[in-house]
Amino acid sequence: MLLQETLDLYEPENDTAMEDDLEEAIDHGILVSKLAFLLSKEMEMDENYCYTMAVAGMVHDIGKLKLGQFLYKRSNNTLTVEEMKYIRMHPAIGYEILKKYKYDDTILESVYHHHENYDGTGYPDNLKESAIPIGGRILRICDVYAALISDRRYRSAFNQETAINLLIEEVKNFDMGIFLAFLRVVHSEKFSDVNNFVHEINKKNYSWRKILHDGYY
Ligand SMILES: [Fe+2]
């Protein structure tokens, strides 16, 4: 059913750029899912919670697909204030979609709060510290790391060391206990599976990647 909803957002006359956007969104979802699962395990959460967070990771940005036409078909990379307002709606839109399909409360609250910052500067509710549901705090770290180590249409991927340094610079946004657990995950043996997956997705030949690699961006 959720797949149907996703396909409904997808208009047949759209070109390869739109297909690439959908595939990129799915790759990002899988990556965040893997990270959220490993991080929850490292935090010694029970098996059921770890799988719940794997699902939350997969669907955390589903609200962005509703904004897809507007956000992805853009020709420049500078967001206007108006566009920022739309982007900030994606956690709430995702929440509504997932609620409709009766996803459980842990997933709903994790998705709704995945852009809250630990110091209270995030959105949608400017929640601070332990007021942010733990799933939201888990997804926040996984999402930022996943974005940094992936190629984006406006920049190439950062390597693992640089990505970690950038996370450290932004550490005010994260729960320190969860962040330290995340670092243990990154430096664990089982992380090679994640690195292999990242390697595969960064090799894909998306249409926008040709532009990226031609050096226009
Ligand atoms: Fe997001």
Image (tube, rainbow, N blue to C red):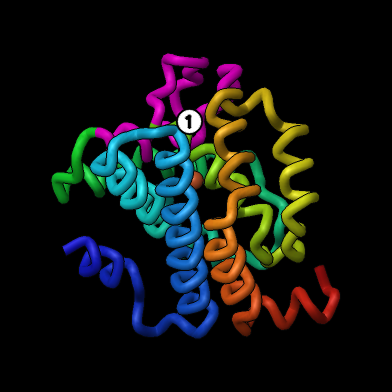
Q: Which percent across, then down, holds residue 198?
A: 60, 67
Q: Which percent across, then down, holds residue 133?
A: 38, 25
Residue ID at (51%, 15%)? 128
Q: Is residue 72 located in the magenta-colored stretch of the structure? A: no
| Magenta-colored span | 106-134
Residue ID at (62%, 27%)? 173
SS at circle 1: helix
Residue that numbered label 1 is attached to: 137
Residue ID at (19%, 45%)? 103
Count of labels in the image: 1
- Side of 192 relative to 162 (left or right): left
- Side of 93 relative to 71 (left or right): left
172 or 186, nearer to the observer: 186
Q: Which percent across, then down, holds residue 115?
A: 51, 35
In the image, what residue type sits under mark 1? Arg
Residue ID at (60%, 40%)? 184
Quarter of the image where one finds residue 122: top right
In this picture, is 118 found above or below 206?
Answer: above
